Amino acid sequence: MKKPNIFIDYDDTLVDFNEAVLAEVNSWNGTSLKHCDIETYSFLPDTFGPEVRKLWQTHGLYEKVKPFPTSKWFIEKLKERYNVVITTKSHPKVALEKEYHAKQHFGIREGFVHVEDKKYPHTKTGPLVDDAAHHIMDHILKNNMPGILFNMNNQNGWSKINLQQYRDWE
């Protein structure tokens, strides 16, 4: 019997991508920002400039990215009932590095989808787990499928839903 799909975001859902990014940004700027200070997806590049977007595309950054403590267990439990598909927004410069990172830490050998723009066209056949509210809202509204907003220890400022923001989503 074929298992149903479940789509899981990678950065800041399974791994603490912004911890590595914040370490770099804080060292460049003499700041001490934390996850809760990042209120929107574009906060860091809007505040510190285009160098942040270049950092997101830097080879070697994933060597500093650590999985969340329970994410490997989470993936193993999901694999018992679902076909787990990592669906992640990736710049082509780091896509293979990110995929290698997932293989190394989670044993994901297949089922890895890189998208450069919108996720919802790639997640039509199952629920989506993601840290970005806009990806969850797109997924629910466009695919009529469930979405789970992930916010590790409620620390991510960008994952807190402002319902007013989504009132006129479409």
Image: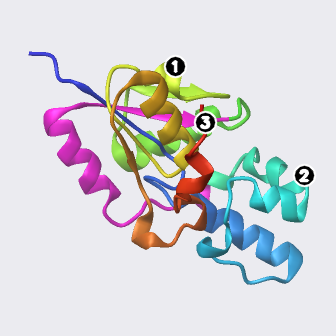
Answer left or right for 113 relative to 36: left
Using the image, tell me which numbered label, if any, was put on residue 89.
3
* Image coords of residue 127 (percent x, y): 33, 33
* Relative side of 45 to 32, left or right: right
Q: Which residue is mark 2?
A: 50
Identity of the residue drawn at 88% across and 77% down = 29
Residues in magenta, as a range: 63-90
* Placement of the C terminus among the 4 image quadrants: top right
Look at label 3 and name its amino acid. Lys
Secondary element type, mark 2: loop
Above or below for 99 versus 26 = above
Q: To which quarter of the image does residue 162 belong?
A: bottom right
Residue 89 coordinates in the image, percent (x, y): 60, 36
Q: Residue farthest to the top?
A: 1
Location of residue 144 (image quadrant): top left
Specify few, some or many for label 1: CA neighbours under 10 Å numbering under 14, 14-19, or 20 or more: few
Expressed as whole percent of the image width and height from the top left, the position of residue 70 reads 31, 63
- Residue plotted at (47% across, 29% down): 141
Q: Earlier in the sequence, mark 3 or mark 2?
A: 2
Residue beneath disc 1: 121
Q: Amino acid at mark 1?
A: Pro
